[in-house]
Amino acid sequence: MEREEGRGSRRAALVFGGLLIIGGVALLAAQLYGYDLRIDIDRIGWPAFVIVPGLLMLITGLVLSDEPGVGLSIAGGIITTVGLILGYQLLSDHFASWAYAWALVAPTSVGLSMMLWGGLHLRGGMFRSGLVSLGVGLVLFLVLFAFFEGVLNIGRERGLAAYGRQALPFALIVAGALVLLGRLWPSRRRRRWEAAWQQGDWQAGGWPAGPPPTAPEAAAPLAPEPAEPPLDRPVEPTAPPEEDGRPG
């Protein structure tokens, strides 16, 4: 187990180091060939400096098939989501939306990252856990959005604040969809996934191994012992060897 974790960490470092080298070579080539790399912050917005590193971290985590890839994907998803929220707030001047937008960071972005990683690497337990986190986060966000914008009206018609009254019906729809998905999910396969995820019993491709045998395998039959004569039959005495009568 420790060897696999060390291998995953080493692979993550190799991928991240490779991305840094590629980025440095691209920047050097652009400077040598006279490309203007100056960035107009007023045009693209400073949240791009949060979104781009988050996307790079998310992509790197999704590439890795070991457990360190899960953590890197979740961290990248959180950073990317924070950057997107900051970009929206900068464009709409609606910074009061942090009152409910935090639900998009966690658990929504965490669940989405887990779903992406689990779907790419065929990890059923991880995908289902991410789906639950994503659904809970969306319902929480919509309920808070409906309260702060539809009831308190903290946004004053800025950005998406005008849709606050429609958020509660959407929250009910999302919650109902989650209940239906939970019931329609194959129960037998779900139990196998959960048991395999808890025990770490996964095949190389990521799917859980088959169910354990219901009964232990029968042992190989032993070699038959030599038959003994029945006790009710008298044992005939053996005659002594005859002497030939010759003098010794």
Image (cartoon, rainbow, N blue to C red):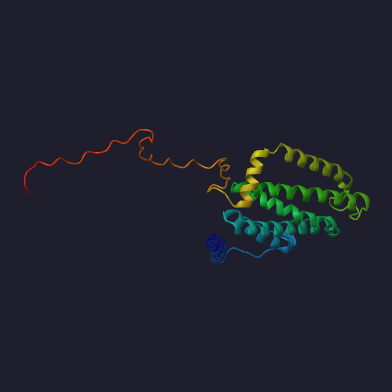
Residue 180: x, y in percent? 76, 38
Residue 175: x, y in percent? 80, 43
Residue at the image position 73 percent from the left and 48 percent from the top: 132
From where the camera sits, is residue 213 visible? yes
From where the camera sits, is residue 117 visible? no
Residue at the image position 75 percent from the left and 62 percent from the top: 42
Taking 114 as reference, is 179 above or below it? Answer: above
Q: Quadrant of residue 64?
A: bottom right
Count of all numbered marks drawn on residues in the image: 0
Task: Name the quarter where the N terminus is drawn.
Answer: bottom right
Q: On the rendered structure, is 27 left or right of 105?
A: left
Taking 83 as reference, is 171 above or below it? Answer: above
Residue 6: x, y in percent? 54, 63
Q: 246 or 203, which lies in front? A: 246
Q: In the image as oriented, which residue stretches furthest toward the top?
A: 233
Q: Quadrant of residue 104?
A: bottom right
Q: In the image as oriented, which residue stretches furthest toward the right?
A: 152
Q: 85 or 23, which lies in front? A: 85
Residue at the image position 64 percent from the left and 40 percent from the top: 189
Q: 222 or 5, which lies in front? A: 222
Q: 150 or 174, which lies in front? A: 174
Q: On the rendered structure, is 225 left or right of 165?
A: left
Residue 200: x, y in percent? 59, 52
Taking 10 as reference, is 153 above or below it? Answer: above
Q: Quadrant of residue 154?
A: bottom right
Q: On the rendered structure, is 46 left or right of 100?
A: left
